[in-house]
Image (spheres, rainbow, N blue to C red):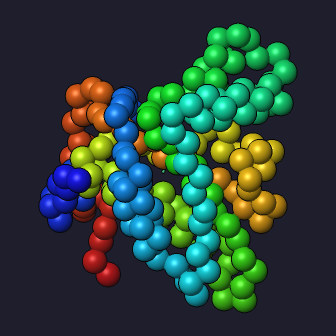
């Protein structure tokens, strides 16, 4: 398992990759990435995250659920749109649905738990890059569909925070934008 982790430069150069191909991570690499996600900041240790991964042929079954979701949202969706939904999970060899799983807590409101699950999603992208894969976090209308969430085993106290696509990079990485910290930060 080759790692390319190199501290600050690694973080500063992180770059989402929309075009991904196989081979994807093996079971050990998936386990390593999930272990990284499980170290996300987590107020009161509520563990407000769940992960559902799709690989191989199971991506087709998930694509059918995406098409169902599309047709619930838009019963008139044409064949092109339906095919796009069917094929969406095939854009990477590994797709991980990241789910925020909420617990009632007097000191930890839902937004904190959602943020924590978001950190887990981001951590998955970082872990993927550390293993020399490309990754991208996507949402879209599917991420708003509570029926889709239930279709993959989600519960009423849960919601999607996104879908992390992971695989081998299949195009040149885009240039990383150069941003000036002064535009976003001031010392008080
Ligand atoms: C919550 C969230 C949802 C996103 N949803 C999508 C999406 O549905 N489709 C997409 O192309 N990019 C989406 N993005 C953006 C990409 O993950 C990525 O940030 C973007 O392609 C820019 O690349 P960069 O992160 O390397 O700058 C989303 C990002 C976040 C944080």
x, y percent for residue 176: 23, 42
Image check: 119 left or right of 85? left
Image check: 134 left or right of 102? left
Which of the 4 image quarters holds residue 80?
top right
Residue in the picture at 65% in, 35% down: 62
Residue in the picture at 70% in, 28% down: 64
The answer to whether residue 121 of the structure is visible from this angle is yes
155, above or below 48, in the image? above
Image check: 121 left or right of 170? right
Which of the 4 image quarters holds residue 74?
top right
x, y percent for residue 102: 70, 71
- The residue closer to the viewer here, 89 or 104, is 89
x, y percent for residue 23: 34, 34
Q: Which corner quadrant holds the C terminus?
A: bottom left
Which of the 4 image quarters holds residue 107?
bottom right
Residue in the picture at 60% in, 20% down: 84
163, above or below 40, in the image? above
x, y percent for residue 95: 51, 42
Q: How many marks?
A: 0
- The residue closer to the viewer here, 26 or 91, is 26
The answer to whether residue 17 of the structure is visible from this angle is no
Residue in the picture at 64% in, 23% down: 86
159, above or below 163, in the image? below
Image check: 10 left or right of 18? left
């Amino acid at each position: 398992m080759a790692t390319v982790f190199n501290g600050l430069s690694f973080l500063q150069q992180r770059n989402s990759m929309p075009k991904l191909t196989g081979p994807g991570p093996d079971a050990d690499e998936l386990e390593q990435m999930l272990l990284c996600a499980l170290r996300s900041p987590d107020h009161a240790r509520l563990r407000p995250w769940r992960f559902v991964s799709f690989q191989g042929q199971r991506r087709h079954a998930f694509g059918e659920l995406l098409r169902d979701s599309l047709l619930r949202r838009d019963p008139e969706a044409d064949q092109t749109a339906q095919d796009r939904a069917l094929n969406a999970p095939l854009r990477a060899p590994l797709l991980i649905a990241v789910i925020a799983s909420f617990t009632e807590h007097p000191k930890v409101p839902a937004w904190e738990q959602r943020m924590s699950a978001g950190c887990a999603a981001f951590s998955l992208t970082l872990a993927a890059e550390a293993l020399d894969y490309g990754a991208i976090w996507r949402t879209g209308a599917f991420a708003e569909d509570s029926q889709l969430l239930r279709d993959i085993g989600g519960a009423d106290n849960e919601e999607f925070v996104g879908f992390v696509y992971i695989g081998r990079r299949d195009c040149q990485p885009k240039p990383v934008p150069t941003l000036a910290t002064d535009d976003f930060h001031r010392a008080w």
